Image: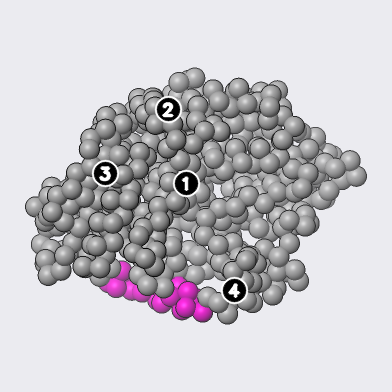
């Protein structure tokens, strides 16, 4: 039942970190635009952005081994690591601007310094880590990284992981103190609270059932109030679909040609969590290892210090799993209903290509708690089952599309799909997602509002001083930004002061 129609300038679908970031950027650039947010859950940041549904790593390639690949000639390609790191610097600049302009009161409510480490075992992986360390520590973005394969040094860095460890093979780690732990759930709620106080219309428990183009080029959304069951029509000149895994269905409903032929593959995640203060106190770092052969990139094992509501805990995982749901609070029919005539061949090709991945995910689902504990003991040798609980994390939907490398290619990372005229955009994909939200939402703004960019540029540069500039090519600006963001975000005990150290290599 439809009654009435509401017009607005901008509609944001989904109250996660992406919509929160885009809304915050637009409010700074054009304060008088009317923005409406629709969210099917009862509050902001309940899905992928929620602090219990992700690892909270401010992804900056300081520890994630899958962002640096070994080439056939033995060299290490760090280009993706540089890109991800630069994108995270952009996020930190925007957050600093929000703190300095009193939009955010206390940065400690969402970001804290936590060292980032990579940890490997076995001669082959130790050799790789040495090469990776050399390639990264020579680059200005990764100054201050330390390497050690000395068990005594590692005992100082990661006592919980070294305690009672049998040293029957070489081990090594890198460490950098300027890493962060980010509570993206808290940040999402902080940003939406600010937007709400600036006349952004927040509509929770409202589900977008349909999206159609109108004769004047606007978009009309059929939105259902989930409490009353009544539906209303809402029109806007610009629509952003930031509904996490739910974005694909809405993109398909929009009917834009750019969304044709794209599929999605859902992957669920689980973490082992320890909240016992005596154990938590023995580990202060995010430590990433190497993914098992055949595992998807988002299944890199890591043992993380997390700070949630000012309380520290340890997360280990993620263990991958399979559920046909596209959202944690989604439907068991999500995968099935995402298959359309235009993406059927793509999806079938992906199925044939990813038999090993499917097998891996099924094996992961079947693991008992004790088998998961065995994986944890690779990191914490004497971990006891009773000290760790299993927590179901968020759903991620990986993009499947036809690429130069063939039909049905499974894509890792995030991608903006937008209409040719820029009137609608959707964000698909997963990690490093939240960490790069500001860069990705700037991409949306540049793609969708090209006619305004020249006028907006001074304000964008005020919010993000490195806008349009390559940081590695401007070391003085990079140094300045590292210093100012560390100060504004309260990261000085894990910020640039530490990074100015020469790389340390102990063996």
Give the residue displayed 22% in from the left and 54% down from the top: 173
Query: Which SS class for mark 2?
Result: helix
Residue at disc 4, secondary structure:
helix
Task: Answer yes or no: is residue 358 visible.
Answer: yes
- Please report contact status of discs 1 and 2: CB closer than 8 Å, yes or no: no
Per the rendering, the mark at residue 145 is 3
Q: Is residue 466 above or below residue 418?
A: above
Give left or right: position of 270 versus 441. Answer: left
Give the mark toward the camera: 3 or 4. 3
Image side of residue 32 versus residue 433, left or right? right
Residue at the image position 50 percent from the left and 27 percent from the top: 465
Name the residue nearer the viewer: 314 or 420. 420
Question: Label 3: few (<14), some or many (≥20) within 10 Å?
Answer: many
Q: Secondary structure at mark 3?
A: loop
Foreground residue among 229 and 369: 369
Query: Percent position (x, y) of residue 464?
Result: 52, 29
Q: Quadrant of the C terminus?
A: bottom left
Q: Can residue 313 be spotted in the picture?
A: no
Task: Tell whether label 2 touches label 4 (CB within 8 Å).
Answer: no
């Amino acid at each position: 039942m439809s009654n009435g129609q509401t017009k607005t300038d901008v509609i944001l679908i989904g109250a996660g970190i992406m919509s929160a970031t885009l809304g915050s950027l637009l409010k700074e650039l054009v304060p008088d635009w009317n923005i409406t947010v629709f969210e099917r859950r009862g509050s902001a940041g309940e899905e992928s952005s929620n602090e219990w549904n992700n690892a909270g790593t401010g992804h900056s390639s300081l520890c994630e081994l899958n962002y640096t690949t070994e080439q056939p000639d033995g060299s290490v390609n760090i280009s993706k690591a540089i890109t991800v790191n630069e994108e995270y610097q952009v996020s930190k600049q925007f957050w600093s601007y929000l703190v300095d302009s009193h939009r955010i009161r206390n940065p400690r409510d969402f970001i804290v310094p936590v060292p980032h480490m990579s940890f490997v075992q076995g001669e082959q992986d130790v050799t790789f880590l040495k090469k990776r360390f050399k390639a990264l520590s020579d680059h200005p973005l990764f100054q201050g990284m330390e390497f050690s394969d000395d068990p005594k040094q590692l005992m100082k860095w990661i006592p919980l992981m070294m305690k009672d460890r049998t040293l029957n093979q070489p081990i090594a780690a890198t460490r950098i103190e300027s890493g962060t732990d980010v509570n993206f759930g808290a940040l999402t709620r902080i940003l939406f609270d600010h937007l709400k106080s600036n006349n952004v219309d927040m509509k929770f428990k409202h589900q977008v059932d349909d999206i159609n183009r109108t004769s004047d080029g606007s978009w009309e959304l059929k939105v259902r109030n989930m409490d009353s069951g009544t539906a209303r029509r809402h029109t806007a000149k610009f629509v952003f679909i930031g509904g996490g895994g739910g974005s694909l269905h809405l993109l398909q409903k929009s009917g834009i040609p750019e969304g044709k032929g794209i599929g999605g593959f859902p992957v669920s995640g689980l973490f082992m969590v320890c909240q016992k203060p005596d154990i938590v106190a023995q580990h202060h770092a995010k430590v990433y290892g190497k993914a098992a052969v055949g595992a998807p990139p988002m299944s890199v094992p890591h043992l993380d210090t997390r700070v949630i509501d000012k309380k520290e805990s340890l997360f280990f995982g993620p263990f991958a799993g399979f559920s046909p749901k596209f959202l944690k609070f989604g439907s068991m029919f999500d995968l099935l209903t995402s298959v359309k005539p235009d993406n059927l061949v793509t999806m079938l090709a992906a199925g044939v290509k990813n038999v090993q991945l499917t097998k891996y995910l099924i094996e992961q689902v079947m693991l008992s708690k004790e088998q998961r504990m065995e994986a944890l003991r690779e990191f914490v040798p004497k971990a006891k089952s009773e000290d760790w609980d299993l927590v179901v994390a968020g759903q991620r939907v990986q993009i499947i599309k036809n690429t130069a490398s063939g039909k049905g290619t499974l894509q890792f990372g995030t991608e903006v799909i937008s209409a040719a005229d820029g009137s609608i955009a959707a964000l698909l994909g997963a990690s490093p997602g939240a960490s790069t939200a500001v860069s990705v939402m700037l991409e949306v703004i540049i793609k969708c509002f090209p006619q305004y960019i020249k006028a907006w540029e001074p304000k964008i540069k005020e919010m993000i001083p490195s806008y349009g500039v390559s940081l590695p090519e401007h070391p003085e600006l990079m140094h300045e930004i590292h210093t100012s963001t560390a100060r504004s975000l309260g990261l000085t005990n894990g910020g640039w002061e530490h990074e100015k150290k020469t790389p340390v290599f102990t063996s």
